[in-house]
Amino acid sequence: MKQEFEQLRDRAFLEIKAIMSSDALELFRSRYLGRRGELAGLMKRLKDSSPEERPLLGEIANGIKQQLEELYEQTLQLLGGTADAPLQPAVDASLPGISLSKGHMHPLTQMLHEWEDVFRDFGFSVADGPELESEYYNFEALNIPRHHPARDMWDTIYIKNPKSKTQNPKSQENRLLLRTHTSPVQIRAMEKYGAPLRIIIPGRVFRYEATDARHEHTFDQIEGLMIDRNISLSHLIAIMSEVVKRLVGDDLIQLRARPGFFPFTEPSIEFDLTCILCKQKGCPVCKHTGWLEFGGAGLVHPRVIEYGGLDPSVWTGFAFGMGPARLAMLKYGIDDIRLFNSGDLRFLEQF
Amino acid sequence: MKYSLNWLKDYVDIPPTVSPKELAEKLTLHIAEVEEVIEQARSFERMVVGRIEKIEDHPNADNLKICMVNIGAQLKLGTGNSEQTHVVDSNNLQYDKLKIICGGKNIYEGMKVAAALPGAKVRWHGEGDLVELKKIKIRGEESEGMILAIEELPLGIPHSGLQTPNHRAEPVVMDLGSISAEVGSPLADAYGMNDVIFDVENKAITNRPDLWGHFGMAREIAALFELPLKPYLDSRAESQILKAKQKQSTDKHHALLQVDVQAHELCRRYMGAVMDGLHVGPSPAWIQQRLEAVGQRPINNVVDITNYVMFDIGQPIHAFDAQKLDVLDELSRPAEYCIRIKKASDGEMITTLDGVQRTLRGDVLVIADVQKPVAIAGVIGGMNTEVDSKTISIVVEVANFDAVSVRRTASAMGLRTDASARFEKSLDAAQCEQALSRAMQLIQEAIPGAQLASPVVDAGMWQRELTHLVVPHDFINKKIGGEPLPENKIENILNRLGFAVTRMKAPSPLQPENSSLPVSGLVYDIVPPSWRSTGDISCPEDIIEEVARMSGYHALKRELPHVQISSRIHEPEPALIRKLHEYLSMGAGLTEIKTYSFVSARDALLVGNGQEAFIAMENPPSRDQELLRPSLFPGMWGVIQKMLPMYPELRLYEIGRVFPGRESLSLINNDDPAEFMFPQGEPMMRQPYRLCIAWATEQYPLRYLKGVLEGIGRACGIIMALREGRTHNLPQWLDANASLEVAVSETIIGYCGLISLALGARTKRKGTAVAVAEFDLRPLARATRSVVHYTKLARFPSVKRDIAFIVDFRVSYSRIVQIFDTIELLDSFELFDIFESPSIGLGKKSMAFHLSFVSPDHTLRDEEVDDAMVQLKHALVNSCHALIRDS
């Protein structure tokens, strides 16, 4: 008999957990707690039990009755109190998920992957080149002769010549350096693959610069190069504005082209993006201009095409370069560029 | 380069309807980016010149006074160039007099002061952020404004006449007694601070020497707004220099100037003249103000004027004190000055105007008199001929020096000057004349009595040369794209910029090398102006840029290109790296780190055996980053040490290039073809991509690490062999007794193992062990894909058994595997438990495996499996003295 009471209790407990409406609750009440309900029926049979058992069983029965009534009251209140909103089901689905993987990809890697994917959709392939580069590829072949003031645009880290005491003029002419931009891969790719060509080149670049919250001597760039026949400025700007819409995921984002100067492109342009923070209302980040600097680009200078081993009267092209760190900082509100290379997990685990 | 709006207005009448912001945007869209627009008057808004009429004691404060300040009637608080004009609101302010509470000690009745009205933005005591001034009660008395102390004046006021504020207990009120402005005038006007400054980054105009002066920028603005450009010189100044040049030999002069250009190739033109009757003193206020506006410190009238002309037309000018020049014959009248432009004698010394004594190399171009060098050409003048307060006559130099030579000299000396920055960009020799005329004119205006004392000399081999560019009309439109531009629009743009354009039907005979361009239809013969012909405009593409930027890139119709599909380039390494990122971060649950490509010499020692030559930099980014990283381990180790106190477990990886240098314990197989070449085809130093993985945890870090490596093999479709191999020639950071080689297709690509005991002892977290792997990615990228072969599914069911045994702890897992491999029916096995415990005996370990038996051709009977189990147990007992535990 004791078992019967407990079974009834367990069944009632299970059932009431699933009750989501007052109608169902009323059914529950009449079934278990009503005058002709199951509990009442069971209690009527108490008198059949032995006199020794009866007080104990009575206690159990009353206990169960009390519990069920309490549960009923509680559920009634819950249902009444939230007439329109659905009740929490018996399983609390709002509990936190149990994490399967605790891994994180570096925010810059994530960003580079996003960019790669977008450019791949436009038919660009990923190419790569050395970080330790020769002066020839980093400057000369990009139409930046040795004594040209344009060299000042890149503060360069040079490699020490191991035989510095017997420096011969030839090695002096072709010093090794850490590439200051991903642009040397333009020349390497033209040499390696010829034309037509559509590539992007993500990679690490270096500048001789003191670091602070806004400046880094080590950062990433993503470079692009398209070589084909009859490439125009209009093509360049069109592709970049499509890419940006995809990258930012916002059709309202606008790309603005304005004049710039790079020795390896002619004409050269700079791209601005509508400020993603203030949406052109004006904020300190965009210096109240509504525009953020996004990258440089231009039509590949005929001399650069020639350095790449191609005939500039046949082949034309455009190139562009951008820095993902700046965009990542804006996107995530990161206030110190040095965090990217810090290895600090408190930072990395946020991505 | 900073441009002053007032200065630009000398040459072009910018309509008042164009606001500074609009102008800045136009310049940004068509010429070069304006980084900042500084409206001087902005910070002076609602500040006026006032006079203290009456001073009374504050009833409730001993240190404060109540001042009645006259601020004049009919206030106008804006100024010419600022966008808005504020008029004091009569509802808020009592007219012409303000009651101001002031704590300054130096105030007196009748004192002229700078008064700030409510709404002005003030920096209290010159510290902190700008605060908007409001009417407030101070100790029960209303104050309607503020009398500014010296340090509370807005920045940008010329320094002359300002006492430097010291740290004082009480603020000292600024006394405007010396300023002529009337009571009530805006403070900005009183100081002449009504200019607007446009700041353009120098890098943006590297290719435009003509924009390194105001006249050049005015010319662009005139072209942009289709406004007339005023001539640089008025006709009076122009005729003066013409006359001075014509009179070269006829007239009587106080002085004669001989210019001997010996190094013709480095100095195309040298103009000079002697001026006397000078008095050196402060230059006129307007010159000082303009120099201050563009960030130059006024020095004296002669120096300021040379500077002024440089910022005016972009031509550096130098003035030598004529009396300090050595002459051939001291007694000759008129005095005969002799200037020589020549290469220095090797080892010659000169003390330059910055006070540094310099030894010259033989390739440095100098200006010399008959005895000594007096200037380093195009870079800096010599102290020996410096203009000082006693100077009464000068030799003015306006020259055109070779760009490369000036740049070489300046960088060799580590001395970049405003002059060298301009010369190195290759200047227009035609402008020398204009610059000299302007300098002479200004000196005569600024210094009463100053006069030209010699004929104007114009030396050098320079001749005006015209470049012709032949550019087909179609070429321009093809390169720009979008809607084609009509002929007259192209011509109009170019003409406005000073280019001469002639329409032709046939290719010009003047430039046959352009014959590869399409020449059907209309062709332009274009002659760029002299100020654009010094290298900037040299090919047809340069013309494209002029047309495109002036018509506006932002307005260009955007069209996606039509191209032929070509086979995609596929570089295996970037593809592998992408896959690894995804597997390691998403699959294996590791966190990617990025560390610098530089290490300290001390950290580099972790990597090798001390014998290697790592790659050093001439100018390392910092003192503890002297070498290129030969391995990813030092960076990883740095992060582990930093992070381990905060995290009980670490699972990290980094992918990046390393620079092993020469003769290190490199993993590089020298038979491998080099990845990159020098232009001459010689192989470049290796710089392979590596992957470094670290796993720090209390138990089995190496097993987790191996699990990751095996996973990489699966992800890449190859087998990563992890094998016990040589214990010598390991990097020092590895524990030789707990390391494995990582190999792909028999090629060793790296190592994995526990870190060495010495390093392990340095971790702050006791009980945590660290396992690290590092290996090259290139062999992995090139390894055969897809070693996975499908095996037919077993047709017969497998039989599962377990086995547990105790062996000596030195018996390796791999030894057990060898034994398992001898049992034919044993299909697969899995280690599910391993432990060491005193209860099973010292130096012993217990291992337990799940076993699975299967036969390819029949269903196994129990007896067969029993036999196999007996066979296995025997083998274990015989080969490694295993004690089989009862199951």
Image (cartoon, grey):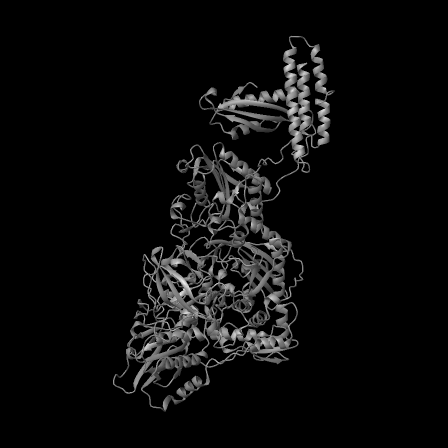
Q: Nearer the viewer, residue B611 or B497?
A: B497
Residue positioned most to the right:
A36
Above or below — where is B680 with respect to B886? below
Above or below — where is A17 with respect to B321? above
Q: Nearer the viewer, residue B601 or B766?
A: B766
User: x and y percent of residue B323 in the render?
Assistant: 28, 79
Q: Nearer the viewer, residue A126 or B695?
A: B695
In percent of the image, x 35 and y 55: which residue is there? B61
User: x and y percent of residue B466 in the render?
Assistant: 51, 80
Quarter of the rendering occupied by the N terminus of chain B? bottom left
Classify residue B57 as left or right of residue B766. Answer: left
User: x and y percent of residue B771 in the render?
Assistant: 47, 37
Count numbered badges in the picture.
Answer: 0
User: x and y percent of residue B490 in the render?
Assistant: 61, 75
Residue positioned most to the top:
A51
Residue positioned most to the left:
B331
Quarter of the rendering occupied by the C terminus of chain B? top right
Evaluate whether residue A52 shows in this view. yes
Evaluate whether residue B569 shows in this view. no
Above or below — where is B818 with respect to B417? above
